[in-house]
Image (spheres, rainbow, N blue to C red):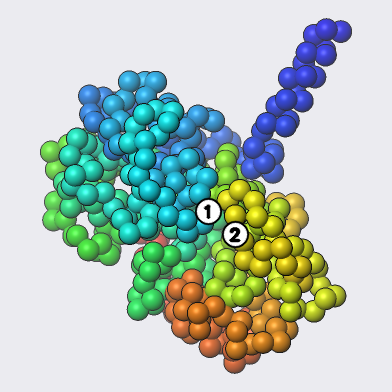
Amino acid sequence: MYKLLWLLAVLTVFAFTTPSYVKAFPDRENASGKITTGAERMDLYLPLLKGKRVGIFANNTSVVSITNLVDTLLKRGVSIKVIFGPEHGFRGTADAGEKVGNYTDEKTGIPVVSLYGSKRRPSAEDLKDVDVMLFDIQDVGTRFYTYISSMQEFLESAIENDKPLLILDRPNPNGFYVDGPVLDTAFRSFVGMEPIPIAYGMTIGEYATMLLKEGWLTKKPKNIIVNIEGSHKAAAPLSLTQFSLTIIRCDNYTHKSRYVLPVKPSPNLPDIQSVYWYPSTCLFEGTVLSEGRGTPHPFQWFGHPLLPKNLFSFTPHAMPGATSPKLKDQLCYGWDVSGTPEEVLKKTDGKIQLKWLLEAYRLFPQKDSFFLKNGASFNRLAGNNVLINQIKKGLSETEIRKSWEPALSKFKSIRKKYLLYEE
């Protein structure tokens, strides 16, 4: 009896401490078997770090099991000289867009250099005591999610400072489709740096390879080695005497996988449902509507006080990670597209969904003020100034989608050259 009670107690504790991402698909997290991230394949990259001084770009998603990679590497004797942090900071608690300064990590005593704000890449001074640069951050596969921009800047710095770069690859939870308008480079910003669609269907490692090989970087190294460790092909040896990019590949991942993240990638993506909706409903950030920050379901609840009162209602409030949400403490009317992960996958249907955006504009009584900053914010997210005009003209979703070609098909052809995982 005592053993039974003890077992029930353990199971109860586990149930309440297991991250919501893992609970979401308890039997589908790794539908074809256990997916192993690059960070977990330590036998492949610990030898490359032995005796080296490391500068690591990491945040709260950089985990091995449930332990942060920095803590894991320190326990294994790796010499980490500096930590670089992206948007939301190294421990992942800052609001979206919040500027985080440099500081010393309390747990490790290692200096943390913020690369979000005016400074976006490591300087020569930051890297003076570094032999190897290491990148490990969980992306969500959306162009305007800034972690790929941070990775690009980190890659540029590695080339500028002649430091080898090691990327620990992670699955893309939205990596099973490619869709959306391809960015017009006239609208480059930190929420869209390269001519890729909103949902680009690549892992960080695949994307880094494309940046290098397509010549999209400002620095174009003449002598470069790209190694893929953990693939079925033998990798070339890593040389620390010339610039090299080494990618530690995920194991048992394909672009058909429905990978569920073990931790939330940022404060306002609290579950896999928000991650699935994010490529579509983040466009509301460029409008006066609440995109659901300050609610239990960001990017799944969206609306405005001026929309019809017979719609779904909610009120955004200040909370950790959303201390000043749009329309704070105001009763909003709009839509609730939440549901189980399976229901959300069915609603999103493997493509960017525009119907709620189009309907919101149609119903909004003050159309001249629907888009923030005369549309500048929306255009940065859309990657062009075409979509905003299509919405204003009342074009249908079908008509808008047709306009994404042929650029979308061209990108798919480019992308295919750099895939490390089966489609």
Kindly identify the residue that appears in the image at 59 percent across and 59 percent down.
324
Badge 1 or badge 2: first in the primary sequence:
1
CA separation in Å, label 1 and label 2:
9 Å
- C-beta proximity under 8 Å, tags 1 and 2: yes
The residue labelled by disc 2 is 324
User: Which image quadrant: the N terminus?
Assistant: top right
- x and y percent of residue 254 in the render? 51, 47
Q: Which mark is residue 95?
A: 1
Whole-percent x and y of residue 160? Answer: 18, 52
Query: Which image quadrant is residue 230 in?
Result: top left
Identity, as a three-letter code, of the amino acid under mark 2: Ser
Rendered residue at 75%/55% (across/down)? 339
Q: 203 and 19: which one is in front? A: 19
At label 1, the amino acid type is Asp
Looking at the picture, how far across and down is residue 291, in whole percent?
Answer: 64, 65
Please tell me whether mark 2 sits on a helix, a strand or a loop. loop
What residue is at 27 percent from the left and 40 percent from the top? Answer: 133
Instruction: Answer with left or right where residue 146 lies relative to residue 273.
Output: left
